[in-house]
Structure formats: structure tokens, C-alpha cells
Image (spheres, rainbow, N blue to C red):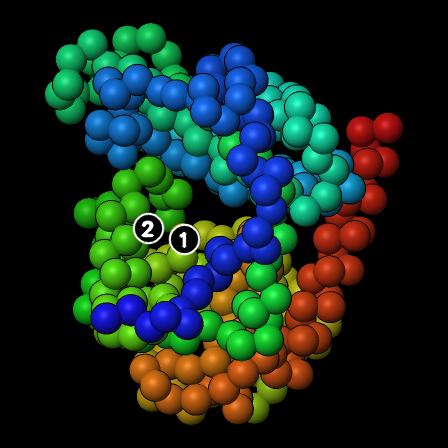
């Protein structure tokens, strides 16, 4: 049974403004209760689509180009024509945020599917009317408990698959693999699932990229079987730039259980501490350790510099 005190890396502070937000759906910005797509949509019917999560800081979408690199590469790989360039996507995001009066503490779920189908079957050619594009931008501040308590992980039997089955680098609507892992973790009394790769090495969680710290050095997986996270790469780059040893390597649960610190990375929560893995306390069992705290400060500074640069570039 799920623990009554469980939480996830995407827990937010309650904000009643989200009950009446405006949402972009295929060219129109409409009230939340009117935001609908067809039951024939490829995303609803088959999970055939890609998405991005972006955060708004001082009116700027942090690391916008990195997110667009990932989105357009994924859509190209599955022959999904977005029908817009990056400026067109940026315009959608800006107009949706403006319709909600948002400048800070906002999170966008941008979703692009292959669109409405002529018949309820699989073949992509049945999607005959172009893509469906939806942007949900919510007022979104991470819950304080994420930093003060940390996340409890349970290793789950569901693994991250091989690239020739469904490449984990796709940020696709087909998230059942991760949903199963999340359910397995919750049924084991944890908050989220720690997923292994097909060879049994520690890989990622069902929702975020995973890091450990051992003797001042930061470890993460090789990246072969996990989402190519934007925040993940920024943390690796920050380590290289600031003299923090960092390794992308295969490692086992033995190494994770004995870690001095562990944390998760993602666009929403940035760096979220891990309190325990399979009931074993990590770094005292609550809050972020010294290396995680340093990386969090470096990341906040990177956000500030990136936002300033984006503002300057846009004039």
C-alpha cells in the first residue's frame, strides 16, 4: 500500500490560479475547461507524440534552444512534422504565458502529436490533418518538502529498454514503461522508482535523471539508456567547469547504497535530494548534502546568466 506521506519530484505548492488558466490548443488559447483534443488524436489513441517541459524565469524560457534541439531531433527521428520553426514554438509559449499573466514560477508542458486520425488504427498515414499542438503553462513552485525531506526510491523490476525497442532518449507520449515503474515503487512504499538498465546497472528514475556523490565525486549513468536530460547535461557541464570530479559510468546498486549523497535532476525540480534507496538511508536521510547544495547554487547562477543572455539576444 502507498505510504500516506509519499510525494514525488513534481509536487507543487497549491495554487488556485491553475483552476482557471488559459491553454493553447491548435491555434487557439482557451479556458482550461474548454481545452480538448479529439478521441481520434494520435497521442490519445497510441501515445504517438513528443513533449517538452520548460520553465519560465523572468519572462524567459530557460535553455530554450537546448529544449528545441531535443524536440526537433526527436520529431525528425519519428517523421513527425511539427509544421513550425523554433520561433513559431516560442510564440506559442510566450502568448500562452502572457494570457495567464505569467513571468516567473511557471512550468510548461508542450505536447506535439501526429494529430487526428481518419480511423482508429495504428498506421501513421491515417493522421491526415497535421499535428496537434498543446501548451499547458501552470503556476508552478516546487513543494518545500522536496528539499527538506528528499525523495525515497525503491529499485523496481521495470527496466529502461534498449534503443532498438523504444529508445529511452525519446521524450514521447508513450510513458507506460515509466508509469509501471512508478506504480511498482509506490506499491513498495517508496516515492519513485529507481530503474536499472538491461545489464543491471543503475540508470534513472521513472521521472528524473539520477546522480550519486561518493567522496566528493559525482557519478551518473553512461546515458545510454536514459532520457538525455537538459538539466542532467547542465549539471555535468557545471562539474567540469568548477573542478568537481564527474563520471558518466556503469555502476551498481552497491555503489548507490554506499553513496554519501544522491540527487535527481529535471527541469521542474532542478536538483532534488534523495533521502533513501530501498530503505537504506543516504547522507543522513534528509535534505541535500554539500556537493548537491553547491551544484544547486551553481545551477541557479547558470539560470540567471542564461536568462540575462537570452534577454540581451532578444533585445
Label 2 residue SS: loop
Q: Residue 124, located in which quarter of the rendered image?
A: top left
Residue visible at 60% across and 46% down in the picture: 15
Q: CA distance from mark 2 to mark 1?
A: 6 Å
Residue visible at 82% across and 44% down in the picture: 308
Q: Residue 143, located in which quarter of the rendered image?
A: bottom right
Q: Are marks 2 and 1 in contact (CB under 8 Å)?
A: yes
In the image: residue 48, left or right of residue 293: left
Rendering coords of residue 215 (x, y %):
56, 91
Label 1 residue SS: loop
Rendering coords of residue 296 (x, y %):
67, 68
- The residue that disc 1 covers is 227
Residue visible at 45% across and 52% down in the picture: 228
- The residue that disc 2 covers is 168
Sequence order check, earlier mark of 2 and 1: 2
Residue visible at 61% across and 83% down in the picture: 289
Rendering coords of residue 144 (x, y %):
61, 66
Q: Can you see residue 224?
A: no
Rendering coords of residue 156 (x, y %):
24, 70
Amino acid at each position: 500500500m502507498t505510504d500516506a506521506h509519499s510525494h514525488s519530484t513534481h509536487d507543487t505548492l497549491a495554487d488556485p490560479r491553475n483552476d482557471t488558466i488559459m491553454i493553447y490548443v491548435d491555434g487557439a488559447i482557451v479556458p482550461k475547461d474548454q481545452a480538448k483534443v479529439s478521441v481520434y488524436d494520435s497521442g490519445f489513441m497510441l501515445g504517438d507524440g513528443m513533449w517538452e517541459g520548460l520553465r519560465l524565469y523572468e519572462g524567459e524560457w530557460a535553455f530554450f534552444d537546448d529544449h528545441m534541439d531535443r524536440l526537433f531531433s526527436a520529431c525528425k527521428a519519428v517523421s513527425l512534422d511539427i509544421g513550425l520553426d523554433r520561433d513559431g514554438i516560442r510564440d506559442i509559449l510566450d502568448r500562452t504565458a502572457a494570457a495567464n499573466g505569467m513571468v516567473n514560477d511557471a512550468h510548461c508542458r508542450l505536447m506535439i502529436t501526429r494529430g487526428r486520425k481518419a480511423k482508429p488504427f495504428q498506421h501513421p498515414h491515417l493522421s491526415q490533418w497535421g499535428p496537434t499542438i498543446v501548451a499547458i503553462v501552470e503556476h508552478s513552485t516546487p513543494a518545500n518538502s522536496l528539499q527538506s525531506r528528499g525523495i525515497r526510491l525503491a529499485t523496481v523490476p521495470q527496466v529502461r529498454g534498449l534503443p532498438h525497442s523504444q529508445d529511452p532518449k525519446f521524450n514521447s507520449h508513450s510513458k507506460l514503461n515509466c508509469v509501471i515503474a512508478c506504480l511498482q515503487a509506490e506499491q513498495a512504499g517508496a516515492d519513485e522508482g529507481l530503474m536499472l538498465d538491461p545489464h543491471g546497472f543503475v540508470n534513472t528514475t521513472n521521472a528524473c535523471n539520477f546522480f550519486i556523490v561518493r567522496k566528493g565525486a559525482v557519478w551518473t549513468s553512461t546515458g545510454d539508456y536514459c532520457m538525455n536530460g537538459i538539466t542532467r547535461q547542465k549539471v555535468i557541464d557545471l562539474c567540469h567547469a568548477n573542478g568537481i570530479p564527474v563520471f558518466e559510468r556503469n555502476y551498481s546498486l552497491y555503489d548507490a547504497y554506499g553513496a554519501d549523497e544522491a540527487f535527481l535532476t529535471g527541469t521542474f525540480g532542478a536538483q532534488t535530494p534523495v533521502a533513501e534507496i530501498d530503505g537504506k538511508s543516504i547522507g543522513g536521510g534528509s535534505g541535500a548534502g554539500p556537493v548537491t547544495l553547491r551544484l544547486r547554487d551553481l545551477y541557479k547562477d547558470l539560470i540567471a546568466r542564461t536568462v540575462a543572455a537570452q534577454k540581451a539576444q532578444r533585445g
